Amino acid sequence: MGTDLAHQRDQLRWFGGMVGNHVADLVARYGDSGVVPKALTDYISGRDGYDYAHHGRAGNPSTDFVPDEIVDRFCLVGPESAHVDRLQELTEIGVHNFALYLMHDDKEKTLSSYGKGVITHV
């Protein structure tokens, strides 16, 4: 887990792009007002196609429409303490499972940080 927040967000933007595909499907089915939250419909408004050749990969060029706010909404970024704080918040509202996606350029460090400094606090 590097400490450069901008770099972390860029490495994780692919996840927002992947979620954007699902949101686009929901908007196509239900429209862009009402059922789908406005925060989600707003961010996919800049989505212009999606190239599945880069799907699920850091550096995906099809995710330039994903703003930092969406990355922060769906991913845990920052130092270990920020991950612990967010996971504790999620636990308090009833989340009992989470997935650790090691699909970025600092896999070993992230896995080690979770094993030594995050999971033990959650």
Image: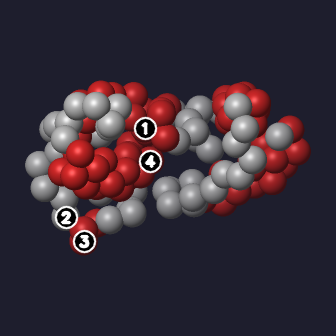
- Quick one: label 4 or label 3, which is nearer the N terminus? 4
Q: Nearer the viewer, mark 2 or mark 4?
A: 2
Q: CA distance from mark 3 to mark 2?
A: 5 Å
- Please state, as top left, top right, bottom left or bottom right, where the N terminus lies in the image: top right
Image color mode: secondary structure
Q: Amino acid at mark 3?
A: Ala
Q: Residue at x 70, y 31 (%)?
A: 93
Residue 56 sits in which quadrant? bottom left
* Quarter in which the C terminus is drawn: top right
Residues at discs 3 and 2 in contact (Cβ within 8 Å): yes
- Asked if residue 27 lies left or right of residue 48, the reply is right
Could you tell me residue 69's position as x and y percent? 39, 28
Name the outermost residue toward the left.
48
In contact (CB < 8 Å): disc 1 and disc 4: yes
Residue annotated with mark 4:
12
Identified by mark 4, the residue type is Leu
Tag of residue 51: 2
Instruction: Check disc 2 and give the amino acid type.
Output: Asp
Q: Identify the residue at horizontal 19%, vertical 59% (top origin).
A: 50
Tell me if 29 is positioned left or right of 112 in this view: left
Residue beneath label 1, please? 71
Assess disc 4: are there few (<14), some (14-19) or many (≥20) residues with their C-alpha within 10 Å of its C-alpha. many
Question: Mark 3 or mark 1: which comes first in sequence?
Answer: 3
Which element type, helix, strand or loop, lies under badge 2? loop
Label 3 element class: helix
